[in-house]
Image (spheres, rainbow, N blue to C red):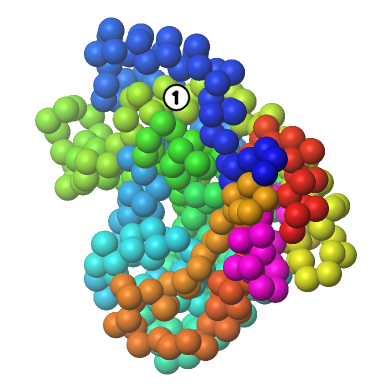
Amino acid sequence: MGKTIEFARLFDGIEPLLGQYMSKMEELIRSTEFIGGPEVDSFEKEFADWTESSFAIGAANGTDAIIIALKALGIGPGDKVLVPVNTFIATSEAVTMIGAEVDFVDVEDAYYTMDPKAIKNYLDSAKGVNVKALIPVHLYGQMADMPSIMALANDRGLKVIEDSAQAHGSRLHGKQPGAHGQLATYSFYPGKNLGAFGDAGAITTNDAELYKKCKMLVNHGRWKGKYEHEIEGYNMRLDTLQAAILRIKLAHMTDWTKLRQSKAKEYIRLLSGRPGVKAPAIRTGSEPVWHIFPVRVAGRDGQMQKLKEAGISSGIHYPIPLHLQPAYRHLGYAKGAFPIAEQHALEELSLPIWPEISMDEIAMVAATL
């Protein structure tokens, strides 16, 4: 067996900046600045600037960010929220955690994201009466069809949260997540394009009132003093150590994103027209950031084994659509309810991609597939 190609080598991006990370962590340990403080304030401002948003609020993780966004919009018991059926469970479980009801819609075959036609069909059905919000997911680093989704939302008076956990810096017609919906949420799980050294997340918005609500909700309902609570909130704030790490990384995100995009372009060049392999499509006006590079292949499990035997790691996103998860049996869905997502679950294969992967490694993956 030749050189092993991992799914993602996180340390490739960490090692060149290791001295900065260690120096900053020692500084914070010596100052005992562990909760809040200038590092969190600075990260929130810098991340808002980088995402071209008016405001950013740090959160403990991406799931908490969605919970806070839902609470800030007043979503709760008696309300229903629609999410795409092929996303990580964090998107849907955040809905039920605040007492609302979650339900699913299918996705676009070419782009894997929430299908506006499926949303409309749901809203026009008897089940659509109590829908109050939509959570489109910008999956794999490519934004959903936000103009069509927002047209539906505005027509029906629905709130929109953009789940951008995989889409840091992505664009659609020049606009980043959060420019369409009321709020965008982010995860900084270590494997994300912008990853912390543990769990972390954020919310962005252009609405000053929503910013204030989110800022209070993540920190026990406080806006001014330590013991002055405007509302009941949560303990879902961003750790200072994680904010400091994210600040160092954020300075390199634009360059890292360009590297990911160049590597994805090479994959697409090598795989386009390959029999039995469907390279990802790019929506008109879209600039994906390629958190995941998904292809669709016939006999996916056999291809995955073939890659493994060649020393190449790969993944599946996602092998079981949410409606078929044991956690959602109570919704009563059976196989066939969401045919596009179910087909994706049988065919999708995530290939290795990270900023520092070499063109030779990409060529080796493509040749083996």
Judge by depth and name the residue closer to the eye, 217 or 229. Answer: 217
Q: Residue furthest left?
A: 227
Q: Reply yes or no: does residue 298 show up in magenta.
A: yes
Q: Reply yes or no: does residue 42 show up in magenta.
A: no
Q: Residue furthest bottom?
A: 126
Give the residue drawn at x 26%, y 62%.
98
x and y percentages locating residue 243 in the rendered image: 40, 27
- Residue receiving disc 1: 245
Quarter occupied by residue 363: top right
Query: Relative to residue 252, is residue 300 depicted above or below?
Result: below
x and y percentages locating residue 207 in the rendered image: 46, 46
Q: In this view, does 226 lie to the left or right of 358?
A: left
x and y percentages locating residue 208 in the rendered image: 42, 42
Judge by depth and name the residue closer to the eye, 69 or 247. Answer: 247
> Which element type, helix, strand or loop, lies under badge 1?
helix
Span highlighted in magenta in the image: 285-307
Question: How dense is the environment of label 1, judged by Cα within 10 Å: few (below 14), some, or many (20 and up)?
Answer: many
Q: In this view, does 34 lie to the left or right of 193?
A: left
Q: Which three-letter amino acid code belongs to the residue tagged 1? A: Ile
The answer to whether residue 215 of the structure is visible from this angle is no
Give the residue drawn at x 54%, y 61%.
317
Q: Look at the image and tell me in which quarter the C terminus lies.
A: bottom right
x and y percentages locating residue 39 in the rendered image: 39, 20
Q: In this view, does 309 lie to the left or right of 95?
A: right
Query: Relative to residue 209, is residue 349 depicted above or below?
Result: below
